[in-house]
Amino acid sequence: MDSACKEQAIDSKPLFGDSSPNQSPRPNGSRGFFTQQAIAIEASARKLGNVHPNAPFDEMRYEDFCAVADRIGHGVDSLFSATQSPSVGMLIERSVEAMLEASGVNTSLGTIILLAPMWLCSFASCSDAKAKSSLVVEDNDSYDQSRVFGNTVGFEMWDRNAFQIEIEQVLCRMDQEDSEAIYRAIRLAHPGGLGASKVHDVRDEAPASILDAMKTAAAWDDVALQYTNGYQQVWEGAERLIRDAHAGVKADDAIRCLQLHWLSTRPDSLIVRKHGEQVGRMIQQRVNEVLQSGPYGSDEFEDAWRMLDEDMRIKGRRINPGTTADLIAASLYLGQLISEGAGA
């Protein structure tokens, strides 16, 4: 945790809302279970400019994320039951379809693109045997990060290099069919701020190698960047969340501080795509001012945080750090696997 976020965070109360009535518990330890947890917990946290239980957008609410989490979680488990080894492209396309069926809006395209390769890693398939019963989320339970990342043994056994090698192997196996399916999924989700590209534009024919397209997009999209850098931000975020949980930090606080850390070090790529580099840098500067305003949880800190959050939500010029939210959700997913020893 950053120094500005350390004080008072450990003693704060859990701020996660109750799980949505639309969410039915997933089979313990399945890919779908961890996916549902990751999407719902990320949306539950009180973060700058993002949807959370007390801050809806006009076109989407927290309940939409819960419905999407449930639908995608069930869909992923069903796909792996019906198809022993679905492709990355199939997983992304089917999950985007499930997202739109559940909510009618693009809540989670970036998250899906990040999660799909991890669903195909071998450690994800062995998570059933290592999952603990304490991870079950019953109706009307509150999300508590200590229950999600409660196993210190898994973190001690975590092999970051092995994860990076395997995720790169999964990505390198993608072919023309994956590329076409991913392009269809992106067009279907119709993400904001996409703009036009001289090469590998999603409106054009899909390239033979989706990795080539991701390498091009990595210059302006941090989701695409993960496909080229071994998921560096994702595993860094997962490790940070686990360390905070083991230190007794509540989930809402840990996730808030992870968002602030990332926004203070680099502009959110969705903000830059939609509003330009200058706005992205301005938000980065203001986040640093929040971190310097006082200890985490102090009146000075919360006042500065609230003022920035309100400025980012002004109707007609909403500034949503959506890529950072996608990275947090992916980190939550990986963190659950690490904590349960599935990445050992």
Image (cartoon, rainbow, N blue to C red):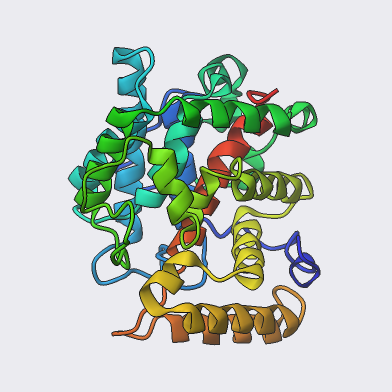
Residue 114 or residue 82, whichever sits in front:
114
Rendered-image quadrant of the N terminus = bottom right
Which residue appears at 60% of the width and 58% of the height? 255
Q: Residue drawn at (61%, 24%), measured in percent from left and top?
A: 132
At 36% across and 51% down in the image, what residue appears? 108
**Does residue 26 lie above or below 194 as drawn?**
above
Q: Is residue 227 left or right of residue 92?
A: right
Q: Residue at x 51, y 77 (%)?
A: 280
Horizontal relation, residue 70 to residue 225: left or right: left
- Judged left or right of residue 279, residue 260 is right
Q: Where's residue 195, x and y in %?
A: 29, 67
Q: Residue 142 at what x, y percent from top left?
A: 51, 48
The residue lying toward the viewer, choosing from 179 and 92, is 179
Left or right: 22 as drawn, with respect to 130: left
Residue 314 in picture, x, y percent from top left: 37, 86
Residue 17 appearing in the image: no
Position in image of residue 49 (x %, y %): 45, 73
Q: As rendered, which of 320 and 168 lies closer to the eye?
A: 168
Query: Looking at the rendering, which quadrant does residue 182 occupy?
Result: top left
Q: Residue furthest front?
A: 198
Location of residue 313 with respect to 76 vertically, above or below = below
